[in-house]
Image (tube, rainbow, N blue to C red):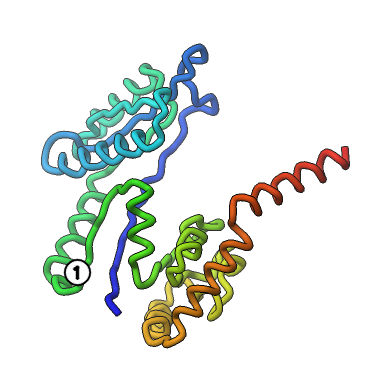
């Protein structure tokens, strides 16, 4: 069975104001991007900008506007000036800034892969449309989510619905979503020897089809839109009845 490895890099953002809309009449939400758009790492900054623009195309909401600004490279004055300019422009959310150390670390990862893992076929996909992600997960041998912190990751329920085996950590709501050895596999966060063992278990499992059916069955019983809608309705009804 061919194993495919996928890496998803997420960028966190911070909020400048609790009132996200910059214009109450037009309901426009301005989202700022602080990234190196010129110089040595401009390819990374422009790639991130392109990913955000693709994401907006998927959302198809004309009320969300991207406001990109060049963060420079180790230039605090330029960074400070860019943030002030965003505030004056009515930006309420800023993604970034992407610092020099972040970029150096990313280069270190890429260099390590080039030097040591050329035959491993690791591929960085970047931002993908949702339909492409679903196809990627469906065609993958395993979805691995080695998180140290989580809530109840939607990607797990999506993978289960697609019948793709999931290996994840025993943190937050994940053990509630995955029954170890029945609808997925769990391991202690940071214990990569245990993770490796779980990968081998799945790849050698001759009853993998049955395993996938168990996952799809649980996903349908817990995450089907009609099930979620009914549970949500029941919660609201209970609250209203108790008023």
156, 17: nearer the viewer: 156
Q: Report the residue at 88% width, 42% height from top.
A: 242
- Across and down, in percent, residue 88 comes to 37, 17
**In the image as oriented, which residue stretches furthest toward the right?**
242
Badge 1 density bin: few <14, some 14–19, many ≥20, Cα 10 Å: few
Q: Would residue 1 be found to the left or right of residue 243 on screen? A: left
Q: Can residue 172 be seen from the camera position used here?
A: no
Q: Can residue 195 be seen from the camera position used here?
A: yes
Q: In the rendered image, which quarter contains the N terminus?
A: bottom left
The residue carrying mark 1 is 121
Q: Is residue 11 above or below residue 167?
A: above
233, 65: nearer the viewer: 233
Q: Report the residue at 41% width, 78% height from top.
A: 195
Q: Report the residue at 26% width, 55% height from top.
A: 125
Q: What is the count of numbered marks?
A: 1
Q: Is residue 24 above or below residue 185?
A: above
Q: In the rendered image, which quarter contains the C terminus?
A: top right
Q: Would residue 134 be found to the left or right of residue 37 on screen? A: right
57, 226: nearer the viewer: 226
- Across and down, in percent, residue 185 comes to 49, 76
Tell me which corner region of the image, top left, top right, bottom left or bottom right, holds residue 121.
bottom left
- Across and down, in percent, residue 148 comes to 47, 64
Secondary structure, mark 1, is loop
Q: Is residue 17 above or below residue 114?
A: above
Q: Report the residue at 47% width, 14% height from top.
A: 26
Q: Would residue 168 be found to the left or right of residue 72 on screen? A: right
């Amino acid at each position: 069975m061919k194993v495919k490895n996928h890496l998803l890099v997420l960028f966190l953002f911070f909020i400048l104001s609790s009132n996200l809309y910059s214009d109450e009449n037009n309901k426009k939400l301005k989202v700022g991007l602080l990234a190196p758009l010129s110089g040595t790492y401009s390819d990374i900054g422009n790639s991130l900008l392109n990913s955000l623009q693709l994401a907006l195309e998927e959302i198809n909401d004309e009320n969300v506007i991207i406001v990109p600004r060049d963060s420079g490279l180790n230039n605090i004055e330029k960074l400070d000036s860019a943030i002030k300019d965003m505030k004056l422009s009515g930006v309420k959310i800023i993604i970034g800034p992407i610092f020099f150390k972040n970029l150096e670390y990313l280069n270190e990862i890429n260099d390590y892969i080039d030097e040591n893992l050329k035959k491993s076929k690791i591929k960085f996909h970047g931002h993908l449309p949702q339909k492409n992600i679903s196809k990627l997960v469906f065609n993958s041998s395993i979805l691995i989510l080695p998180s140290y912190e989580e809530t109840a990751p939607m990607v797990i329920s999506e993978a289960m619905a697609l019948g793709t085996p999931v290996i994840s950590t025993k943190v937050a709501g994940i053990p509630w979503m995955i029954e170890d050895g029945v609808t997925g596999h769990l391991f202690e966060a940071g214990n990569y020897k245990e993770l490796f063992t779980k990968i081998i278990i799945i790849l050698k499992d001759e009853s993998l089809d049955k395993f996938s059916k168990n996952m799809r069955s649980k996903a349908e019983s817990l995450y089907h839109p009609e099930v979620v809608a009914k549970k949500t309705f029941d919660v609201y009804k209970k609250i209203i009845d108790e008023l």
